[in-house]
Amino acid sequence: MGRRKHNSAEARKEANKTYYVAKLMNNPTSPRKTRLVADLIRGVDVDKALAILQFNPRESAPKMRKLLLSAIANWQAKNEGKRIEDSQLYVKSIMVDEGRTMKRMRTAPQGRGYRIRKRSNHITMVVGSRVEETTAAPVKEQTEE
């Protein structure tokens, strides 16, 4: 492996240490219906997002709440000794991608059969800390002329 490729791989590894990801694969709900819930919690603080998901009547809300708790647990595994309240965790990004589609047949008039598509999705949730982002950003010093 060349030096430039090695350096970029090391930089990618360091960047991934600050990501706290949880994934839910093959969730048997339509991606369109799940995106409605995902849009509610994108960019919201973790405690507020948990409250939103707890009282949302949609089918995918309890699954996404469990996924958010898993992402928080992943954050705790990488940051032992830190408190969630002090780090100001929030839902950094949430993506709902289309998963496998099962095709089924439903009886139709005159001996025909209509196709039913049972869709599924993949949910990827990334939790970030607002405290780390503010301290990690370099501050430019102003010079007077």
Image (tube, grey):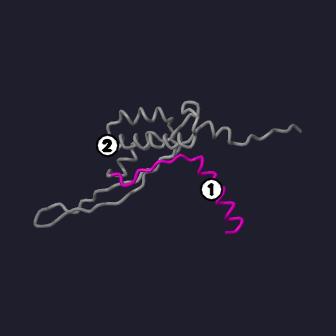
Say which element carries label 2: loop
Q: Which residue is mark 2?
A: 59
Give 9 or 96, whichever is nearer the viewer: 9
Residue ranking furthest to the top: 85
Residue 109 percent coordinates (x, y): 11, 62
Apparent side of residue 59 relative to residue 136 in the rendered image (left or right): left
Residue 60 percent coordinates (x, y): 35, 44
Q: What's the CA distance linking mark 2 and mark 1?
A: 36 Å
Tell me which amino acid carries mark 1: Arg
| Foreground label between 2 and 1 | 1
**Figure check: 108 above or below 76:** below
Give 6 or 137, whichever is nearer the viewer: 6
> Is 24 part of what is drawn in magenta?
yes
Image point (36%, 43%), residue name:
63
Give 9 or 43, whichever is nearer the viewer: 9
Give 53 or 5, whichever is nearer the viewer: 5
Image point (29%, 61%), residue name:
102
Apparent side of residue 39 relative to residue 29 in the rendered image (left or right): right
**Exactly how many numbered labels are in the figure?**
2
Q: Label for residue 12?
A: 1
Residue 132 percent coordinates (x, y): 63, 39
Image quarter of the C terminus: top right
**Quadrant in which residue 119 is drawn:** bottom left
